[in-house]
Amino acid sequence: EFSSFPVTAVKNNAGGWYRNEGTAVVSLGSDSQASNYASFNGQGWYEWQENIPFNPNATYKIDCRYRQVTDPSSGGKNFYCGWSGVASDGVTYVNRTGSNSYGSQHFHGASAVSLTAGAGFSEKIGYTKGFGSPDGTSSSCNLATPCLIHSNVRYLRPMFLINYSAGNGTADMDYIRITKQ
């Protein structure tokens, strides 16, 4: 199974995306490297609002593509991409340590990645399979050693965090793609 989550729909919290925090000004663009992308001036923390049932026996590939356009003059430029974990009630967050928080989530695609401004798009890929006991893992996920989800997670939501922490730079997000294998 394959799903694509249209990052260009993030403008004005449309198309299933919700801004958890940040003041990023979002615009849309296209160029020779990407036919459509969302451009973020400032920090933005976004999450898809539909729950994806988590099957611990399946392998999930998360593929995130972004670039840093201008470095921030203040704050950071780190990029995170992965999953927000959700409990069986379909509402309560379950982060990698089991807390009810959208922070410290399962950053299985990218965790604190910092790109050089102007270097073009970079693709970050991570894999997820199975439960931790009880905690999940944060990053460094590959096909041979997939990351784990906290044992109380029953649903996943794709998420990304751009220009963290409180960065005022500009970064572009091309896509997030999910493949369930």
Image: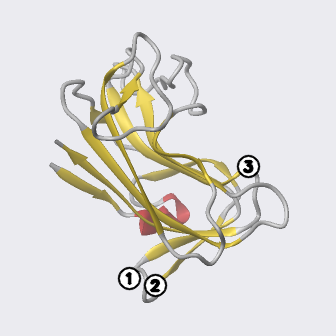
Query: Where's residue 121, x and y in %?
Result: 49, 71
For image coordinates 50% across by 31% down, the residue present is 138
In the picture of the structure, the residue carrying the numbered disc 2 is 30
Whether residue 116 appears in this view of the structure is yes
| Tag of residue 35 | 1
Name the residue furthest top.
133
Residue 47 visible = no
- The CA span between labels 3 and 1 is 28 Å
Residue 76: name its quadrant: bottom right
Q: Amino acid at mark 2?
A: Ser
Q: Which residue is mark 3?
A: 165
- For the residue marked with disc 3, what is the amino acid? Ser
Q: Tell me the element at label 3.
A: loop
Q: Earlier in the sequence, mark 1 or mark 2?
A: 2
Three-letter amino acid code at disc 1?
A: Ser
Query: Foreground residue, 56 or 19?
Result: 56
Q: Residues within 10 Å of mark 1 (few under 14, many from 20)?
A: few
Please identify the residue farthest to the front as the structure is shown.
144
State left or right for residue 163 relative to residue 130.
right
Is 4 on the left or on the right of 176, as rendered?
left
Alpha-carbon span between mark 2 and mark 3: 26 Å
